[in-house]
Image (tube, grey):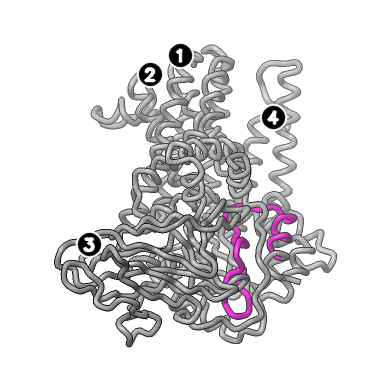
Amino acid sequence: MAIRNILAAAIMAVSIGAPVAARAQTEPLPVEQAFALTSTANATGSTELRWAIVEGYYLYRDRIAAATPSGEAVALDMPRGETKDDPNFGPMEVFHDAATAALGPVPAGTSAIAVSYQGCQENGICYRPVTRTIQLAAQGDPAAPGQSLADPANGGSERPTQSGVRGAFAAADAGTVVTNLPAATPVAGSGIRIDGASGGLVASLLDDGGAAFAVAMFFLLGLGLAFTPCVFPMYPILAGQLGRQAGRPSARRGLAHSSVYVLAMASAFGLLGVAAAWSGQNLQMALQSTPAIIAVSLVFAGLALSMFGLFELRLPSAWTNAVAGATTGRGGIGSTAALGFTSALIVGPCVTAPLAGALIYIGQTGDVGLGAAALFALGLGQGVPLIAFGTFGAGILPKAGPWMQVVTRAFGIAFLALAIWMIGRILPPVVSLWLWAALLIGVGVALGGLGGRSGPRGVVRRLGQTAGMLALIYGGTLAVGAVAGANDPLRPLAPLASNGTARSAGTLRFDTVAAPEAVAEAIAAGDRPTLLYFTADWCVSCDVIEREVFDDPRVQARLGGYRLLKADVTDERPGTTALMSELSVVGPPTMLFLDPDGAEAPGSRVVGEIAAEDFLERVRLAGGN
């Protein structure tokens, strides 16, 4: 069982696979008929709750809770449920046919108990969380044995509950820790019934092995994500920081700096969890504002110019040793920590399945400690290769001398590339293409691609000239592509090579929505399924998806019958923020597959990057053609 769940968690980390049940063809019963609740006073004077569950429906054991009007949780003694094995999110306990729960002691003088529960129709919808109020006599005895609560007029009352996963149990005020999220929880405003199980990774790991096991698994998941585009920008940043240290970077110094860099990066991930609990927002997204991106781009550009020798960084004396990093010792360490922290929050704002699962778990349960620890472990796992890179890579850097000047210039070029990459998130694509072209042409000239370069002769000079010519050719190609209207530096000549086959921008036409009401209006027709895609200009993984998935002719054909909606969350706006909150979306890229009635297909949600083959499988599981 444990091995199976470990494999399931790893599968979720790369967003691959998720079985989905077929859509039910029968109309769902009213909730009071599907789950008829009665309360009875047994011989000992305690209260027993009993649900009569209609065939074809089930009740989630972990969704049953009780609380006093003041919000104090009341213990419930329940038998073990049947295990419903979900291959993505682990075992979940449910009740079929009937469920019972014995009410524990209640405070003296308590006159009513709020009982919350939630159930689903097999292969169909899931109901909103329901809260019924049981009226108790003095001393906590039930007012009437055998009282039926199926009808609110008969002693029970159905109170309105908050919509969405986050508010599923808030109406009961029971302080219950949600450990498993069922599918298709309705949300107000958007008209969508979401697949709540998309955030259950942490809960599944907790059920399987406890808190320590969950944290350890997040470390392993981070290790698996260490070679993704989210982490790649960290390598030149760390290398450039090591190259700026005085003297020859030793393995010992490299270990110290890379360890501090990774610890700061992991701390930033932990801060994401705390910020999510306090504000309900993904701090990485909040920091992707235009001023923040411009500021970080200018920092990298300034670092590059300083490494080219145009000026030397001189900060106030109180800051010099902490930030500048131009000297050795504590100043370099402080600078490294600042870069690591900033890199995690702003440079690499990638949303992956483990990150999304942890943030959703924190938002639903308020368990800041475990959520932050899991994210800290995720950051440490992602940083293990960085520590190895900094430790062993530092030992092979050249000694001080002419070669060191070459290495310093190379790091300056890397920082310039990072500056362009950052500012490109908010610039028009064609402007970014021109910047890349200018950088490559400049590098090509500096390396002697046009000839006439002085310096060492022999193999080294020929290699430099060859690299310079390649840079000039690629830079010139980018310039031609920019003139032709290209927007992808990896395919600059695509507009010129077009043979009549439309690109995704022409075939997959997304209508932009900016609020829950806009989504509800778009899907109100109910004539076809919908793909809702959350994206942003600064989202690097979104660019990968649009290039490698949406441009795939097979994907375009499969999505031909879909209504395509796009929520642009580049800037924080009330409408898109409300939409993300209602649908439990942590950040882009996230995609929801909705049936014609607005229900999200269980297990089909895409979080983070995904390959075209796996995306096609998600379309199939969601019931696409």
Q: Is residue 316 above or below residue 625?
A: above
* Mark 3 residue crowding within 10 angstroms, few (<14) / some (14–19) / many (20+): many
Q: Is residue 214 above or below residue 367?
A: above
- Tell me, yes or no, whether the highlighted magenta stretch contains residue 462: no
Please state which amino acid type lies under the numbered disc 3: Val
First of labels 3, 4 by sequence position: 3
Residue at the outermost front position: 43
- Between 618 and 438, the residue placed more toward the observer is 618
- CA separation, marks 3 and 4? 83 Å
Please state which amino acid type lies under the numbered disc 2: Thr
Q: Name the residue under label 2.
A: 328
Q: Name the residue under label 3.
A: 106
Q: Disc 3 vs disc 1: which is toward the camera?
A: 3
Q: Quadrant of residue 281?
A: bottom left
Residue occupying the point 36% across, 79% down: 149
Please state which amino acid type lies under the numbered disc 1: Gly
Residue occupying the point 59% across, 15% down: 396
- CA separation, marks 2 and 3? 64 Å
Q: Disc 2 vs disc 4: which is toward the camera?
A: 2
Residue 247: assigned label: 1
Residue 448: assigned label: 4
Q: Disc 2 vs disc 3: which is toward the camera?
A: 3
The C terminus lies in quadrant: bottom right
Stretch in magenta = 593-619
